[in-house]
Image (cartoon, grey):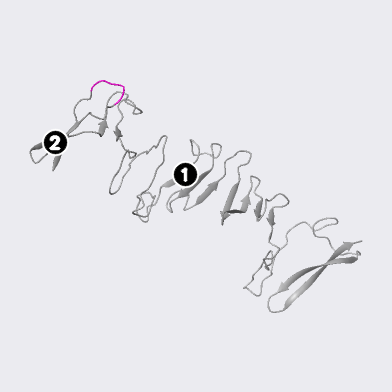
Amino acid sequence: MANIKISALPAASSVALTDEFEVNQGGTSRKATASQIVASAFVNTVPAGGLGFYSPSADTIRTPNSLIVDDDLTVTGGDLTFGSGQNAILLISTSNGADNRAMFLCSGGAIDSDRGAMINMFGNEHAGTGKMQIYAGNVAGGVIESYTGGALRSTLDASGNFGIGTLPTTGKLVVDQTSTTAAIPTLVLEQRDVSEQMMMLDTTIGTGNAIEAVAAKVLTTTHFVKVNVVGVGDRYFPVGTIA
């Protein structure tokens, strides 16, 4: 088993690569250079009383097994990169039945959409009861977009309007089948509970409203809307004007 002796470092504005720490193994004293453990006055970017790790290579801290952090882990001015030898797993070390912690992935300096986009994930026993929340930044242009095949497929804008295949500029839900050769319908409704309706329409019925009673008015058909009933074939809804 090795013992490590860390000697006082010279007063300097930075740590030199020739500074050493001593390792005693099996009665033999060895000194290592080109890597320093720093716990002193302000050195490089380590605040007074802090603990810093420096290496002349691109790696600052490397562990062959697990890195366990009991408090905050702050990465400044660089990337947090996982090696290719294993799957990357980012989790909270709680117990089954006691997953009472939350994880926040934030693009700003606080857990707040006023600072940037973020993803909040809550354990099943947390007060958030297993929720996953996705936030766009609370700013002009703050939307949630999804991409497949390198192309934009859907957009949820700041007003809660959702667009598939297009921006939701003309309605609460906008679906755009953009291909002229796709040979597929824009919308498919499947109802397996055969005793129930295909859809429900909910609004205030009245003259000039989205749904209006027939009363004495007459429909003058001007167009037909093509639909397909599976097992039956193509059928047409008459649409037109009323007076």
Up/down of 66 relative to 242, above or below: above
User: Does residue 5 show up?
Assistant: no
Up/down of 5 relative to 188, above or below: above
* Residue at (88, 62) in percent of width and height: 241
User: Does residue 225 show up?
Assistant: yes
* Residue at (56, 37) in percent of width and height: 114
The residue at which mark 1 appears reads as 105
Q: Position of residue 177 (x, y in %)?
A: 68, 61
Name which quarter of the figure residue 201 lies in. Answer: bottom right
Up/down of 207 relative to 1, above or below: below
Q: Position of residue 243 (x, y in %)?
A: 92, 61
Callout 1: helix, strand or loop? strand
Which label belongs to residue 30? 2
* Residue at (61, 45) in percent of width and height: 143
Tag 1: amino acid: Leu
Q: Is residue 83 left or right of residue 226?
A: left
Q: Position of residue 28 (x, y in %)?
A: 9, 38
